[in-house]
Image (spheres, rainbow, N blue to C red):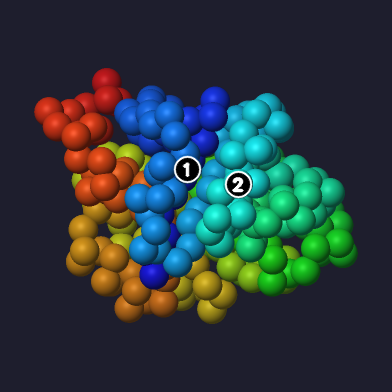
Amino acid sequence: MIIPCIDLMDHKVVQLVQGKKKFLELPDPLAVLAKFAVYPEIQVIDLDAAMGKEQNNAEIVRELCRRKPCRVGGGIRSAARAQVVLAEGAIKAIVGSSAFTSEGVNHDFLRELAGTVPRKKIMIAVDSFAGRVAIHGWKETLALTTAQALPELEPYCSGFLCTYIDGEGKLQGTNIEWFRSLRAVTQLPITAAGGITTEGEIATLESLGMDAALGMSIYRKVFPEFFANRRPQAEQS
């Protein structure tokens, strides 16, 4: 299944290159949602909430959830916040950096979460840069690899969102072999993200039993006017 991504920053939909440089900004999230009407499910990430601005996009997230089945992440640092996100209409809450400490998996937080939120309602985002788990806006890289983390996280969630940061936003393709290595260590559902560009990559991920969360590549098709004469990978320099 293809899952379009709506990333929110300051009430707008944005697309970033490797989570840093803004490439695309669209002022009307509901209009973007309408463009994705044919897709059964949407992934919504509140980037402002992830950076500590908890209420900045809250009303928009609630309205997106009202109109479409949405899995929601960004700034879910407590069991109480996960409960609020689900109560406001999200079909799943995506927990990211809070699932980890600098030493590894944050079992204390995850046990608390598991005691208050049904496991089937929780996804854990495990992002990877240079083969290691990256947290806190991809600013800190742990010694832990994604393949090591997934089995340890299984008791606390119903699935994973795994992002290949190395390819994120570049439109240069993703690392299929990395995703294949993740399938070897868990049977839980995996949503793949990060650099997925071609129909062939999507088909291969589907053959591995993985959904594909699409950002830059799907916006290029839906909003081609914003990509004319611009190359996302050039934005890194």
Residue 102 to residue 187: above or below: above
Q: Secondary structure at mark 1?
A: helix
Residue at screen point 48% across, 30% down: 12
2 and 1 marks in contact (CB < 8 Å): yes
Sequence order check: which comes first, mark 2 or mark 1? 1
Q: In x, y percent, where is residue 207?
A: 32, 78
Q: Which mark is residue 30?
A: 1
Q: Residues within 10 Å of mark 1 (few under 14, many from 20)?
A: some
Q: Is residue 229 left or right of residue 83?
A: left
Q: In x, y percent, where is residue 94?
A: 63, 54
**Residue 164 makes an appearance in the image:** no
Q: Nearer the viewer, residue 151 or 215?
A: 215
Residue type for callout 1: Leu
Q: Is residue 209 left or right of residue 143?
A: left
Q: In x, y percent, where is residue 181?
A: 41, 68
Residue 193 to residue 2: above or below: above
Residue 14 to residue 70: above or below: above
CA gap, disc 2 to disc 1?
A: 8 Å
Residue at screen point 27% across, 21% down: 237
Residue for badge 2: 63
Q: Is residue 225 left or right of residue 71?
A: left
**Residue 32 makes an appearance in the image:** yes
Quadrant location of residue 93? bottom right
Q: Quadrant of the N terminus?
A: bottom left
Q: Residues within 10 Å of mark 2 (few under 14, many from 20)?
A: some
Q: Secondary structure at mark 2?
A: helix
